[in-house]
Image (cartoon, grey):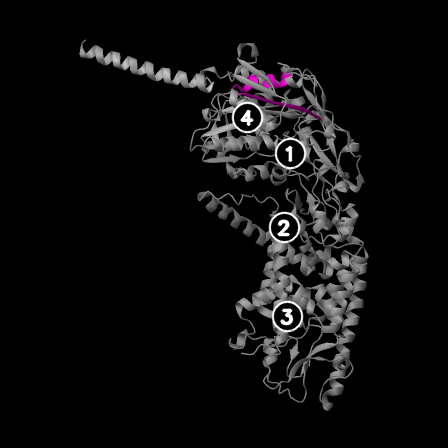
Amino acid sequence: MKISILKLIRVILAVLIFSPIFLFLCDFAGILPDSFSNLLRIQVVPAILGGSLLSIIFLTELTLLFGRIYCSVICPLGIFQDLISWFTGRGKKKNKKRRWYKYAKPLTILRYSLLCICILFLFFRITTPLLYLDPYSNFGRMAVNIFRPVIMEGNNLLNWIALKFHINNFYYITIHTVTGWSLAIAATILLVVVIMALLRGRLYCNTICPVGSLLGLISRLSLFKIVLDDSKCTSCGLCEHACKSQCINSKGKQVDQSRCVACFNCLDRCKAHGIGFRFAWARLFQPAVKKENKVLEITKRTNEIGMTRRSFLVTSTALAATLPVFPAWAKSEKESDPTKLTPITPPGSQSLEHFKLHCTACHLCITHCPQQVLKPAGFNFGIDYAFKPHLSFYEMAYCNYECTICSEVCPNGAMHKLTKEEKKVTQMGIAQFVKDRCIVVTEGTSCGACSEHCPTQAVRMEPYIDSLTLPHVHSELCIGCGGCESICPARPIKAINVLANEVHQTAQKPPEEKPEDEHKDINFGF
Amino acid sequence: MKRRDFIKAAAAAGVAALTFDQLQAAVTKNQMKVEAAPDMVAVMGGEPAQLLERALQEMGGIEKYVKKGQSVVIKPNIGWDKKPEFGANTNPELVEALIKQCFKAGAKKVSIFDHTCDNWQKCYASSGIEAVAKAAGATVLPGNDESYYKEVAIPQGLKLKSAKIHQALLDADVWFNVPVLKNHGGARMSVAMKNYMGIVWDREYFHSNDLQQCIADSCTWAKKPALNIVDAYRCIHKNGPQGRSISDTAVLKTLIVSKDIVAVDTAAIGLFNQIETMDINSVGHIANGEKLKLGTQNLNQLNIKRIKL
């Protein structure tokens, strides 16, 4: 069977881009270099939110030249759907008729409404709808919350076997960073995407995905397009059956360019050489239709475009009217410990506002946090913070003093890259000590676990009663890493808790002093 | 001469001859082994490997503690993501020298681990211990996950009746407790007894159930270390256990070795008091340990060798 060269290139590129993205999202051991995150910076939503002009120009040009290549080669969720279709053999020639694709009309209103919602909310500095619809973030959540745990458990099994053979190259790891909510959203999206892909090919990309809709608007103008050759096409429908976007209308000899994802599956199907990927910019103005149909077709086309524009306007107006309701709805109910009302945002996120605006909860930082201190939130910080990562302190989990990994991998610009020196003075919050809950006071025994774990000695043990010492917080030195909170043994509420800084501050640098000389004159002393 | 007498006499002569041989050998080699080993040895004024070599020699040689084919665990303090010069972790050169000594004595396997406070991979790397241990042929084991720890009974414990202890220690034939001497905000001082907190998983229990008693209780675990080797090459004398800056670290170039864990802690605090005042009575776990008959604070009772290189 001959395979079109364009399709071959598309598949190879897709594999080359998808594999590292998938591995990087699941790389719990930090094996891959952080430079892999560059593959995520060319994803549409991260590029827009991260303000990466270069990526935006590149993606626009790519689409203007060749159509929605992005959807077939760069977008991990798109390639994931292709994998599902491939495994299940949808659209293959040898398979039964019911497994072929058929042309379907676009769901124009739904499609552009969802795009409008995302854009409009962005104007009001709310990323929530985009968080739920962005293909990259959705794929990230699926990978991090479903595939990564499977890989981690596989690692634990492997280690168990290896230890039987006295091989110590692996280590056990317990997963702390998948929550009920994060698993639920990831599983929902996985289910939706798989079902849609099995039933209707790229329906998700052409109906729900705001990136697909946006690129679809651009790809109408692209230079190269899939074109049916009017003179050679016999309307046999072979190409249509292979089209997972369901955008080839073989009867009308039309291709809906806004939905074509440039997968090139159709190219090698045609026996009459009636389909091709050609320079066809002019086609926009001269639709290839038979003369008698021309008027009708043109009217239809104008209607379609008209509808798009109209629906865009209608939906945007309607949505704009409902917007003020949203922030009120987003407020959550109160919690008992006052420090748990505001999320502690990761280092480099600058402020709660900045973080909320840029993070679309792809959970990449959660995978890469070596301390497992970054956890996806539930709805406890409000709907507009749902699923976004926050620092959650429990035993052994606090933000490492010298670690800047999360700020380095974030493709969205939700966290700005920090140097070690900057990180060491980035104050994400301040520890609040409540004496009445402290073990030293309630039990009368030594503790000091908080001070022990404090990397800046912002929490210092100072004389209390007898030989006991009690922690004191020197807020100017505290960076809110949560070392103290993570280890505090007081229950049910800990005696020391970090209160988030809604705007990150700069802590004082612990004083650097010269090392003392060697003690030459000392004796044994016993 | 009766036959029985002959046999008796011959046997006696044989024994005498054998003993004489041993005596002669001892005299010629100039070393009287075993019986003469002191209760504690403190060596000062050298590099970690030199200090260890001399101390072990005085204690009767490593062969006295590690037999051929045994598997050995070395438990240093690797609690913090800090470079060696801060003295927050056991000196890597000391650990390296001890590994080499163990292999020299014919150890089948030498393993190293600690239940760290900071991220274990960062601690192992920053402390320099992972690199030297691997180079010296030791096995570096993780201690980061609960699944490595198994519940054991601590029958003599007053507050701590059982604890989850690292599997490597349960499996080992011999182990060495190799702490670093330092100040500690909570327990006041961290020496050999405090180092036991790194062999258990459930440390939070310690903090919430009388830390000073739990530390002493954990040291009553039946499997005692062959030796407690206290690294006092560098010493964090204030703002411990991590130190706020390098100025909190003093260079003492000392090593104290003993089987008696209470005595070794007592001696180490004696040394410490020359740089920073520390009332030993405030370091509650030492007195608690003495009450549990783990050793003595009365160093005058002991045969201590103090050596300056």
Q: Is residue A221 above or below residue B243?
A: below
The amino acid pointed to by label 4 is Glu
Image-based side of B141 in relation to B181, left or right = left
In terms of depth relative to the viewer, which is nearer, A517 or A179?
A517
Residue named by callout 2 = A182
Q: CA distance from mark 4 to mark 2?
A: 56 Å
In the picture, residue A453 is in which quadrant?
top right
Q: Residue at x 72, y 30 (%)?
A: B246
The amino acid pointed to by label 2 is Ser
- C-beta proximity under 8 Å, tags 2 and 1: no
Q: Residue at x 55, y 52 (%)?
A: A151
Residue named by callout 3 = A10
Q: Name the subunit of mark 1.
A: B
Q: Residue at x 80, y 67 (%)?
A: A313
The amino acid pointed to by label 3 is Arg
- C-beta proximity under 8 Å, tags 3 and 2: no
In terms of depth relative to the viewer, which is nearer, B256 or A13?
B256
Point out the image quarter for the C terminus of chain A. Answer: top right
Q: Is residue B159 above or below residue A421?
A: above
What's drawn in magenta, residue-wise? B249-270
Image-based side of A112 in relation to B136, left or right = right
Residue named by callout 4 = B53
Q: CA distance from mark 1 to mark 4?
A: 27 Å
| Circle 2 residues within 10 Å: few <14, some 14–19, many ≥20 | many
Q: Is residue B142 magenta?
A: no
Residue named by callout 1 = B80
Q: Name the subunit of mark 4.
A: B
Q: Name the subunit of mark 2.
A: A
